[in-house]
Amino acid sequence: MVQGKAHKFDDNINTDYIIAGKYTKTLDYNFLAEHVFEDISPGFYKKMEPGDYVVAALNFGCGSSREQAVLALKYAKVGAILAKSFARIFFRNAINLGLPALICNTDKIQDQDLLEIDLSSQKIYNLTTNQQIHMESLPEIMISILSEGGLTPYLKKNKTFTLPVAE
């Protein structure tokens, strides 16, 4: 279980809001982290603590399919992203890079609420309001990928990668 504060955003937070395109020409992911949400929440990087949560409404991560958006959040030490819905490519990038993307009703979460997430039991607790928030279950394989820190470490550990053969 990990505790962190909620940093609340609205609908349609696109990948350009997460990390502006002008910063994506680098492989310095710590530099990306310093500029996360810069255009819509100036100083976000300095406001958050490692393990804090990004909480949003609908369609989080829409826009381009750039992995830098997930990497910027991961290197900013975001503990998880909670949203009512995600753009599918962003969702998959998050899981593959080891950043939990959790689908739940975020209406009762306020900015700065203290949350606790238990991925093993797939439960979210709002410690500020003393409420449990239901999250959509993640398939066991996604929990395993997240537990290993992403798809690459998962595949290295399990050595279970095979390509399907076309018939």
Image (cartoon, rainbow, N blue to C red):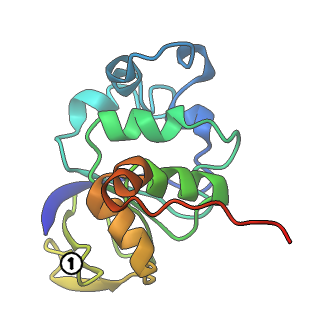
Q: Height in image: 99 above or below 108?
A: above
Residue at x 35% of width, y 71% of height: 143
Percent coordinates x, y for residue 23 in the rendering? 53, 16
Residue at x 52% of width, y 32% of height: 68
Residue at x 30% of width, y 52% of height: 149
Visible residue check, residue 106: no
Percent coordinates x, y for residue 92 in the rendering? 56, 57
Residue behind mark 1: 125
Quarter of the figure with residue 4: bottom left
Q: What residue type is disc 1 on? A: Tyr
Quadrant of the rendering where the C terminus is positioned:
bottom right
Visible residue check, residue 82: yes
* 10 Å crowding of disc 1: few (<14), some (14-19), many (20+): some
Decide which of 5, 160 is in the foreground and name it.
Answer: 160
* Residue 142 horizontal side relative to residue 123, left or right: right
Quadrant of the rendering where the N terminus is positioned:
bottom left
